[in-house]
Image: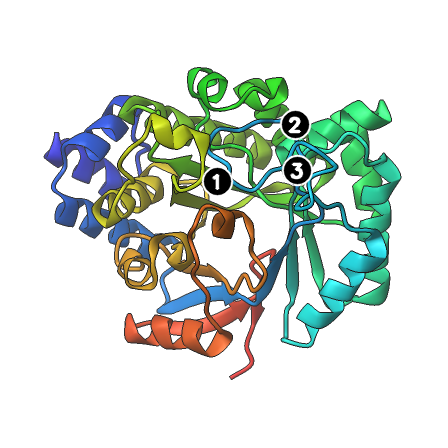
């Protein structure tokens, strides 16, 4: 099987699901990394590793999805720790972020039906108006579904409204593992429980012209086969986006491991996935996702040294600075960095750091 897979990769032939299962389960880790790095060099032949200066703001933690892997959400508005920020309060946070050189604001939050649809479009309009140099990288698939429910608009109409407000990109949160069995087990929120809903959202985004990312949170109740199913599904959605020629597509794939502290799911999952598993996931992702150019190494969720090693296992992007991230923090995971440290980590790994924007256009500042 190793020889067949290597020949396919060298010939540019796509691997099937069975071969993906072999990579994930059986191939020697160092050999797998070598194959992934070979493909990384084909898709991104230079010695550059990109990163973005960004922050992650959360506009509300009120949520009725009851995801068992999440320690961030609150269900009771009377809870002293519950919040929903106004548009102006978020603008104040963005103004502070801009003073740190932030070029992208990633924003996600709970699923709060008390928030009207105009709140979201106003958030985008005000961001673009007040901070034209910052990219509003807002909302994820479950939030788009909630916007559709609250407004009575179709998912595509929601995206058209956000586009008209000035938004052009969307993060890939809410995918977890693209298996209906897994989704049903980890979340009670129906739309979040279906692969079909996730697919509908990203396909509609691509049709309107949005650049989105695809993500995967692994290391909980999924099987190896379901991980490969997820990758193949993402690959198929990207095929359709490229075929449609609407300019919308996945710009990058970002996997990270489940963090169990303070989450209900920890009763079922007693051991977190470690660095070896992460490197294997990164390498398999690079090989299977032959139509997605960028694979992101997560120094943030996996630790800085593991993130550096991932650059030798197929990853070509080092993510962002994430100054104000709170979701992982709620799960007991605290990891922070600066622009200078990101660049130092990339240089230590043998690459040249290049700042980018959300759409992966480059900022050559050196």
Per the image, label 1 sits on a secondary structure element best described as: strand
Q: Are marks 3 and 2 in contact (CB under 8 Å)?
A: yes
Q: Dot 3: what SS?
A: loop
Residue matched to label 2: 64
Which residue is denoted by mark 1 in the rendering? Answer: 215
Looking at marks 3 and 1 on the same chain, the residue that comes earlier in the sequence is marked by 3
Q: Is any part of residue 176 visible from this angle?
A: yes
CA gap, disc 3 and disc 1: 18 Å
- Say which residue appears at 63% left-offset and 39% top-offset: 140
Residue 326 % position (x, y): 56, 53
Circle 2 packing at 10 Å, graded few (<14), some (14-19), many (20+), is some
**Height in image: 214 above or below 230?**
below
Q: Which mark is residue 110?
A: 3
Along the horizontal axis of the image, is 7 left or right of 258? left
Q: Position of residue 210 (x, y in %)?
A: 68, 43
Between 75 and 179, the one lying in front of the other is 75
**Quadrant in the rendering for residue 179:** top left
- Please give the name of the residue rendered at 60% of the width and 21% of the height, measured from the top-left corner: 189
> Helix, strand or loop at disc 2?
loop
Q: Is residue 165 left or right of residue 4?
A: right
Determine whether 318 is above or below 340 in the image: above
Q: Return the mark for residue 100.
A: none
Residue 113 versus residue 129 in the image, above or below = above
Cα separation, mark 3 vs mark 2, equals 8 Å
Given residues 70 and 179, the one toward you in this image is 70
* Earlier sequence position, callout 1 versus callout 2: 2
Q: Are marks 3 and 1 in contact (CB under 8 Å)?
A: no
Q: What's the residue at 65%, 67% (across, down)?
A: 103
């Amino acid at each position: 099987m190793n020889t067949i897979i290597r020949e396919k990769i060298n010939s540019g032939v796509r691997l099937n699901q069975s071969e993906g299962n072999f990579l994930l389960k059986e191939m020697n880790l160092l050999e797998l990394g070598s194959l992934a790095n070979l493909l990384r060099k084909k898709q991104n032949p230079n010695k550059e590793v990109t990163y973005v200066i960004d922050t992650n703001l959360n506009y509300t933690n009120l949520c009725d999805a009851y995801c068992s892997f999440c320690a961030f959400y609150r269900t009771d508005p009377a809870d002293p720790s519950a919040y929903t920020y106004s548009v102006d309060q978020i603008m104040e946070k963005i103004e502070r972020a801009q003073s740190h050189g932030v070029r992208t604001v990633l924003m996600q939050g709970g699923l709060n039906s008390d928030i009207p649809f105009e709140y979201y479009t106003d958030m985008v309009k005000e961001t673009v108006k007040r901070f034209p140099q910052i990219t509003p990288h807002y909302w994820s698939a479950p939030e788009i579904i909630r916007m559709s429910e609250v407004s009575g608009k179709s998912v595509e109409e929601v995206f058209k409204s956000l586009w008209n407000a000035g938004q052009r990109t969307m993060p890939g949160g809410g995918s977890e593992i693209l298996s209906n069995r897994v989704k049903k087990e980890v979340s009670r929120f129906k739309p979040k429980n279906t692969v079909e809903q996730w697919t509908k959202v990203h396909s509609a985004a691509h049709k309107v012209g949005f650049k989105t990312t695809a993500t995967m949170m692994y290391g909980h109740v999924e099987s190896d086969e379901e991980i490969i199913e997820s990758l193949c599904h993402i690959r198929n959605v990207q095929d359709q986006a490229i075929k449609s020629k609407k300019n919308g597509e996945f710009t990058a794939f970002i996997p990270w491991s489940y963090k169990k502290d303070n989450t209900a799911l920890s009763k079922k999952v007693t051991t977190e996935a470690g660095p070896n598993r992460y490197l294997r996931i990164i390498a398999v992702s690079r090989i299977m996702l032959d139509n997605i150019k960028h694979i992101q190494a997560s120094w943030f969720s996996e630790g800085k040294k593991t993130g550096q090693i991932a650059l030798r296992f197929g990853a070509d992007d080092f993510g962002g600075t994430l100054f104000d991230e709170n979701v992982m923090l709620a799960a007991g995971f605290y990891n922070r960095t600066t622009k200078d440290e990101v660049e130092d980590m990339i240089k230590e790994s043998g690459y040249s750091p290049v700042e980018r924007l959300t759409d992966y256009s480059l900022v050559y500042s050196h």
